[in-house]
Image (tube, rainbow, N blue to C red):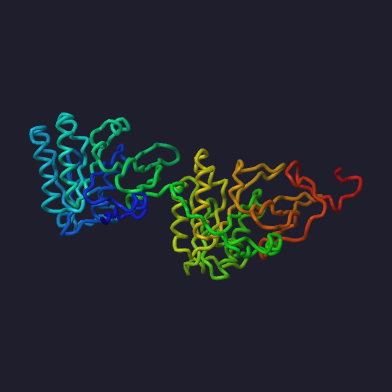
């Protein structure tokens, strides 16, 4: 049977394709977690004149207030209220009659489901019913409701401010075909909302807690990237040029296509400029690219690229380049993964830059999760056949420290940029630390930032401190009595 779309493509993905017609799904969560907005979006996305959406309220806010709050969202259509989306208030019936007429309430919902054949029926909130009837009466009524709705094509959503303890013992959860748990966690600088599918019969759903944002567009969900299991990717035998003069010859003729390359270096050593050049090379070859930045704004990157003659503005206008600036205070790992996943879904985007990884880890504040997240993110990019260029900052002075705490093995290639002490001048040096399944040069090479961007020069013959035990020093032209021994 065809599943009912929620109107949110990523939520349908999480649910294994959508909601099963004839199913009963409990949407549980504390106040402010997004239950009502989600249910309303599902109603307005699916309701037609022939098959309405019916929204029952018990003792929640008045309909006029409910509609007023929803009117700010683009999914809300005032002309649909009545002909397509019908609101029915059950509060007076419950207040005046209680348990005696609970059966009549259930009959009303079932009659709508059978006779009028609505596409969606919502009861907001079913937890309120516990205040008026006994557990036994509620259990029998909900069992009857569940069995009778199953023979219709209606999706029944039961909303409630249920706690974790309620979910363990509540009869609603035992009878339901599906359970969607929404959470709301207070934390600085921004609160965090989440969605987890606890139970969903006859569907293979994505596990884990998925990020939720309530935006001007309404309820938005971002699937947890660790839930994806990319297919095994056949490595490509091709190479792509980095665009950086002198680098490709050190890497066996270029970067293996589809590889993830990590560029390590201190502040100001040239990581961002090399990233800009990597993208500019792809643009010059007619490729589509995605540049994700956490510190430099879109305008700053466009200006920076323009100083070297790379027209990022024209590329953006032609939809050849997307620059995504994610402010540090609002960075969310799942939102970032969704931006990347959607951009590469059609296979047309071949180059991706993330600048920088250390800023990303610091801002996300999910250190315990980050190794699994990064592994999955790299897998999604590889599965799409795109090449990834990632920067990460090291210490500026003194010995270089590993900023990724043992995660460098996840990258196919690792390039190190370091400052070089040469008498009274500070230069720059580059070496290729690692390339997976590829020959590469192991020496250390001069590099410079010129009017044409980042370039790699000749090999350094006598350098100490290459492994980070001391400051990197060029000893090739030092007087004999000053040489380090």
Q: Is residue 144 above or below residue 303?
A: above
In the rendering, at what x and y percent does residue 359 appear? 55, 46
Q: Residue at x 27, y 56 (%)?
A: 2
In the rendering, at what x and y percent does residue 29 appear? 31, 38
Q: Is residue 281 left or right of residue 247?
A: left
Q: Is residue 285 above or below residue 251?
A: below
Q: Is residue 250 left or right of residue 300?
A: right
Where is residue 210, by image quadrant? top left
Where is residue 146, by image quadrant? top left
Q: Is residue 131 left or right of residue 390?
A: left
In the rendering, at what x and y percent does residue 436 appear? 64, 54
Instruction: Give 142 or 296, whichever is nearer the viewer.
Output: 142
Instruction: Give 10 or 184, whichever is nearer the viewer.
Output: 10
In the rendering, at what x and y percent does residue 88 appear? 14, 46
Q: How many discs appear?
A: 0
Q: Quadrant of the N terminus?
A: bottom left
Q: Residue furthest right?
A: 481
Q: Quadrant of the C terminus?
A: top right
Q: Is residue 481 left or right of residue 161?
A: right
């Amino acid at each position: 049977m065809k599943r009912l779309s929620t109107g949110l493509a990523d939520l349908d993905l999480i649910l294994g394709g959508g909601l099963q017609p004839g199913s009963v799904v409990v949407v549980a969560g504390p106040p402010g977690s997004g239950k009502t907005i989600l249910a309303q979006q599902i109603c307005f996305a699916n309701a037609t004149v022939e098959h309405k959406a019916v929204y029952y309220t018990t003792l929640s806010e008045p309909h006029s207030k409910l509609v007023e709050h929803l009117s700010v969202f683009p999914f809300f259509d005032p002309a649909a209220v009545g002909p397509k989306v019908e609101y029915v208030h059950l509060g007076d019936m419950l207040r005046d009659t209680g348990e005696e007429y609970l059966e009549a309430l259930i009959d009303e919902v079932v009659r709508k489901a059978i006779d009028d054949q609505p596409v969606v029926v919502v009861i907001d909130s079913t937890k309120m019913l516990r205040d008026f009837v006994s557990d036994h009466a509620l259990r029998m009524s909900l069992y009857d409701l569940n069995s009778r709705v199953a023979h219709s094509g209606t999706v029944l959503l039961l909303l409630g401010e249920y706690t974790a303890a309620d979910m363990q013992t509540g009869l609603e959860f035992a009878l339901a075909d599906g359970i969607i748990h929404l959470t709301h966690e207070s934390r600085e600088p921004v609160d965090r909302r989440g969605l987890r599918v606890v139970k969903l019969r006859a569907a293979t759903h994505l596990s884990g807690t998925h990020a939720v944002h309530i935006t001007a567009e309404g309820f938005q969900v971002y699937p947890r990237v660790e839930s994806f299991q990319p297919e095994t990717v056949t490595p490509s035998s091709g190479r792509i040029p980095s665009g950086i003069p002198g680098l490709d010859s050190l890497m066996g003729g270029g970067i293996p296509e589809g590889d993830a390359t990590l560029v390590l270096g201190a502040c100001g050593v040239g990581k961002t400029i090399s990233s800009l050049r990597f993208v500019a090379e792809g643009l010059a070859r007619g490729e589509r690219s995605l540049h994700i930045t956490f510190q430099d704004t879109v305008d700053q990157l466009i200006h920076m690229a323009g100083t070297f003659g790379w027209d990022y503005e024209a590329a953006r206008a032609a939809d050849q380049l997307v620059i995504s600036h994610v402010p540090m205070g609002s960075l969310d790992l799942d939102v970032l993964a969704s931006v990347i996943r959607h951009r590469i879904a059609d296979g047309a985007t071949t180059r991706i830059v993330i600048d920088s990884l250390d800023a990303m880890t610091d801002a996300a504040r999910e250190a315990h999760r980050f190794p699994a997240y990064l592994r999955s993110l790299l897998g999604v990019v590889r599965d799409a056949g795109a090449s990834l260029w990632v920067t990460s900052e090291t210490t500026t002075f003194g010995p270089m420290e590993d900023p990724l705490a043992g995660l460098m093995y996840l990258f196919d290639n690792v390039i190190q940029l370091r400052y070089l002490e040469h008498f009274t001048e500070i230069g720059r040096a580059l070496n290729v630390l690692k390339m997976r399944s590829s020959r590469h040069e192991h020496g250390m090479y001069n590099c410079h930032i010129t009017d044409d961007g980042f370039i790699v020069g000749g090999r350094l013959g006598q350098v100490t401190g290459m492994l980070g035990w001391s400051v990197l020093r060029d000893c090739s032209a030092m007087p004999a009595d000053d040489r380090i021994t």
